[in-house]
Amino acid sequence: MPEESNLDELTAKADEGDLEALFKLGNMCLTGEGAVPDPAEAAKLFRKAAEKGHPDSQNELAKLCLEGMGTPKDSNEAFLWFRKAALQGFAKSQFNLAMRYLYGDGAPRNSQEAAEWLRKAGDQGVSHAWYCLGFMNFEGRGIPKDPEKGAKFIRKAAENGIPEAQLYLGDISLRGEGIPENLDEALSWTLKAAENGYAKAQYYLATIYQFDRDGMPPNLKESLKWFEKATQGGEIDAILALGDMLEFDEEGMPQNNVEAASWIRLAAERGNVNARLIMGLRAENGKGMPANLEEAASWYRKAADQGEIWARLKLGLMLKDGAGIPKNLKEAVLWIKKAAIQSIDASLPEKKGIPEKNGLPGKKGLPEILFGPDEEEPEDKDQVDSEETHDTRFAASEKFAKSMRKAAERGDAAAQQTLGSLCYHGVGTPRDLEEAASWFRKAADQGNSGARFNLGFMAENGKGMPVNLEEAASWYRKAAEQGEVLARLKLGIMLHDGKGIPKNLKEALLWIKKAADQGNAGAKMSLTMMSFLSDGEDETPQDKDGFFLGSLFDSDEEEDSDEEEDWDEEEDSDEEEYRDE
């Protein structure tokens, strides 16, 4: 804490308009170091210096405007102050300005501007800028996707000690994306991040040691050690994984269910959805704890509220039977409907996210970092909600797309189907839904079942063509008759709902059963729902108490209108269902 005489001297200089003194006093008021904490006074002092062009003060004032500390919250004003400091070459503000452009906060979203400012900040030594720029290039977030270029930027950040970048580099080394696959390098970088105290890296390292990886035998002792470290760092997934590990010994034999259950309970109490489902199953079946149907229903409800599909089904069945919870057929129908619809959506192939290959599943988020005057390790915030990317299940290059085009133009149906997929996703060729539909149609006319399914999907959802449910049903039927499992499911749903085709519950059941017999999870869930609602062959089934259950995807119950609006949102979401060959 500064001596009182020094504080008086600093105050006197600030009163004379000394910009550095104003900034230092503002920082003292903000942090409470050497002065009474007073965010409003801090904002006032920063503003005086900022208005006279002091970049450090401009950066700090922008942060206060962004957070609404000591001054009204105003992201537009924050953007302006970040920009003023950035234009003076102030590296921290250059990074913070890039984040505003990236998030579209205080200014229209502009990924190109974000990338330019990140590069400037990186050139001045802001290592997190290289990480974010690498992430954007690697994932194609608002700029052309270039994994090799992205990997170079991420390596720069990793070499400068950024643990998030070290973990990312370890992950792509394990998966061989953007750089050659290299298990030793993956372990090395992940270990660096883990030793830096990064809990996510500790968890990931534990999973690497847990399983056999390309000839490297599992090391359960190391795995357990890093899971324990990750749990100390608050990594909820690690808490659940630790519980799973403690349930079995090195030979895979069951052990210590009670201790395992305690860790799983901790993960559940901290909000882990999988742990909540497991706790429900354990409480229902008395595994590692006394059987308790009331507790089981409570955990299922918590997991169901978070969207866990099996918890929704289990909760619905318990409500139907009145097991551990008062019987409520209306609510039972709602939860089982949610599970059925969600299962149908989940059964259709997803195209977003990094394909899994021994690595971390899905996409990783960008940190939103606000650099202050003395912050060496910026704070990691939530994931950026940026432009959707379109990845295929195979790595398709421009060269590959050209070769497919040549084969497609020669009339090869399989190549036409593949080229349609590339045009649809914009991989190796510009994204063009109309061209995709054209190539799918050529392949479909030659009998290609995958192309017929894709045309059905595009006609149903208005992708590259006007919405046409009749045409969609027609293409689904053709593909279904060729054995396409997803087409069978979709045709069954359309027959059930009478959309684009006359309603026919018997035929709907037939097609959905065919899809279920092929192992489709969505179809199996649909059959569970339909058998719950059905009573013989009555097309308006009632249960034995005379309660009208309605149809699988529609309800006329006015008092449940809010719930039904949620169903409509889930059923008509913009998540694209698609099939690639």
Image (tube, rainbow, N blue to C red):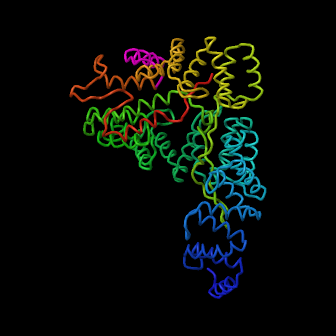
Instruction: State the extent of the magenta-drawn residues as a range.
Output: 501-521
Q: Is residue 566 magenta?
A: no
Eyeballing the image, is 221 above or below 38?
above
Counting every numbered tag in the picture gives: 0
Image location (x, y in percent) of residue 372: 65, 65
Rendered-image quadrant of the C terminus: top right
In the rendered image, the vertical position of residue 179 relative to residue 417, given as above or below: below
Say left or right for 102 vs 239.
Answer: right
Q: Is residue 507 magenta?
A: yes
Q: Residue at x 70, y 13 (%)?
A: 412
Toward which corner of the image does residue 291 lie, by quadrant? top left
Q: Main secondary structure of the magenta part?
A: helix
Residue 306 in which image quadrant: top left
Q: Position of residue 427 (x, y in %)?
A: 70, 31
* Residue at 59% from the left image edge and 43% from the top image edge: 204
Q: Is residue 59 left or right of residue 124?
A: left
